[in-house]
Image (cartoon, coloured by chain):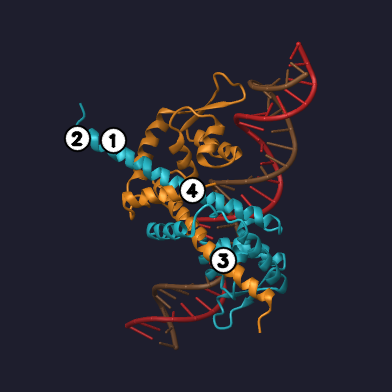
Chain colours: A cyan, B orange, C red, D brown
DNA sequence: ATAGAACTATTCAAGCTGCAAATATAATGA
DNA sequence: TCATTATATTTGCAGCTTGAATAGTTCTAT
C-alpha cells in the first residue's frame, strides 16, 4: 500500500531525476560546444577562452564589457587579455572619456586572426544536427529557462 | 564599394552571430546551473565540483565511472576525490575483482551529507520557469544536439 | 604461455576561474 | 565643496581542468 506521502515523495524524486537529466544535458552540451571551440582555436594557437575573447572583440570594448560578453568575472578577463596582449593580438588603450577604464582595440594582426577564427568556428557547428525550426524552438526555451 | 572578400566575410559573420546566440545561450544556462550548484553546495562547505561528485556517488563506483558521470577527465576525478577523502566523505577501497581500479564508497558522514546535498539541490531548480511539457521538448532537442 | 595492446589510476605542468581586497577614478548628494 | 558611494581594473589566492607522462594491471591474439 502506498500512502499519499510516499506517493508525492516518489513524484518529487522523479521530478528531481528529470531535473538532473535536463541540467546534465545542458552541461554536457556546453562542454561539447567548448570542446568544439577548443579544437578549432588550437589550429590558430589559441586556447578556448582566448578564442572566446577574440570572438567578442568586435569593436572597442572596456574590460567590463568583454567580461560581460564572455560571461566571466572581470579579473578573469584581465588574465585572458594579458595573454592576448602578449601575443600582439589586442591592445589596451586609455579610455577617451573615463580614466578608470581601458579601451580594448585589436591590432592589425588581431583583426586578421579574428577573421580566420570566425571562419573556423563557423564551419561544422555543434548545432548542425538541428533544423532551423528546431534551433528556433531551442533558442526560445533556453531564453525562458535563463532567469 | 564592397569587394567579394568583404561580402563573404560579412556573411560568415552573420552566420556566426546566429550560431553564437544558440551556443551562447547554452553556455550561459550552463553557467547559471553551475552557479546554482555552487551556491547550494557552499552551505555545506562543498565546492561545486565536490558537490557534483558527491551527487553522482550513488553506489560503489570506480574513478573512471565517476569521471564519466561528472563529464571530466579521470585526473580531475582524482583531484576532487582527494578533497572528499580528506574531509572523510568518501573512501577509496581496492576493487574486489580488478586490481587496477579503486572502489569509491561513501562513509557514514558522506551518506548523511549527500542526503542533505540532494535536498538542497532539489529545491528551487534553475529550470523552474519551464512547464513539464516544455522541459520534455527541451530535453529532446538537447539530446538531438548532443552528437 | 606470452608479447603487445588496452585499461585504471595517479602525478605534474600549465592554464582557467571566481572571490575578496586594493587602487584609482567617477558620480552623487548634503 | 567635500564626503560618500559606486564603478573599472588589477592582484593574490585557492581551487578547477586538461593533457602528457608514468606505473601497474588486464585483455587478446597468437
**Of label 3 and label 4, which has the lower sequence position?**
3
Quarter of the figure that contains the N terminus of chain B = bottom right
Q: Are marks 4 and 1 on the same chain?
A: no
Read off the residue under disc 3.
B15
Identify the disc placed on residue A10: 1
**Secondary structure beneath label 4:** helix
In this rendering, the answer to whether A46 lies above or below B85 is below
Give the x, y percent position of residue B129.
Answer: 33, 55
Q: Nearer the viewer, mark 4 or mark 2?
A: 4
Q: How far apart are marks 4 and 1 (CA)?
A: 28 Å
Sequence-wise first label, 2 or 1: 2
Image quadrant assignment for residue D2 = bottom left
Q: Mark 4 points at which residue?
A: B144
Vertical order, B31 against B87 (above or below): below
Name the image quarter holding residue D3: bottom left
The subunit letter for the residue under badge 4 reads B
Which of these two is toward me, B22 or B80?
B22
Mark in the foreground, 4 or 1: 4
Query: Is residue A141 found left or right of B15 in the rendered image?
Result: left
Q: Label 1 is found on which chain of the structure? A: A
User: Residue at point 32% right, 46% down?
Assistant: B123
A79 displayed left or right of C29:
right
Q: Mark 2 points at which residue?
A: A4
Amino acid at each position: 500500500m502506498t500512502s499519499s506521502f510516499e506517493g508525492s515523495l516518489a513524484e518529487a524524486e522523479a521530478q528531481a531525476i528529470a531535473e538532473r537529466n535536463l541540467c546534465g544535458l545542458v552541461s554536457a552540451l556546453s562542454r561539447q560546444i567548448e570542446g568544439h571551440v577548443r579544437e578549432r582555436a588550437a589550429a590558430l594557437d589559441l586556447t578556448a577562452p582566448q578564442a572566446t575573447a577574440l570572438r567578442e572583440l568586435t569593436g572597442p570594448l572596456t574590460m567590463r564589457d568583454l567580461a560581460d560578453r564572455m560571461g566571466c568575472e572581470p579579473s578573469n578577463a584581465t588574465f585572458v587579455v594579458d595573454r592576448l596582449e602578449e601575443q600582439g593580438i589586442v591592445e589596451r588603450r586609455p579610455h577617451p572619456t573615463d580614466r578608470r577604464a581601458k579601451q580594448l582595440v585589436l591590432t592589425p594582426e588581431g583583426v586578421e586572426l579574428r577573421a580566420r577564427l570566425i571562419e573556423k568556428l563557423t564551419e561544422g557547428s555543434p548545432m548542425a544536427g538541428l533544423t532551423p525550426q528546431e534551433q528556433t524552438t531551442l533558442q526560445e526555451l533556453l531564453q525562458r529557462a535563463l532567469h
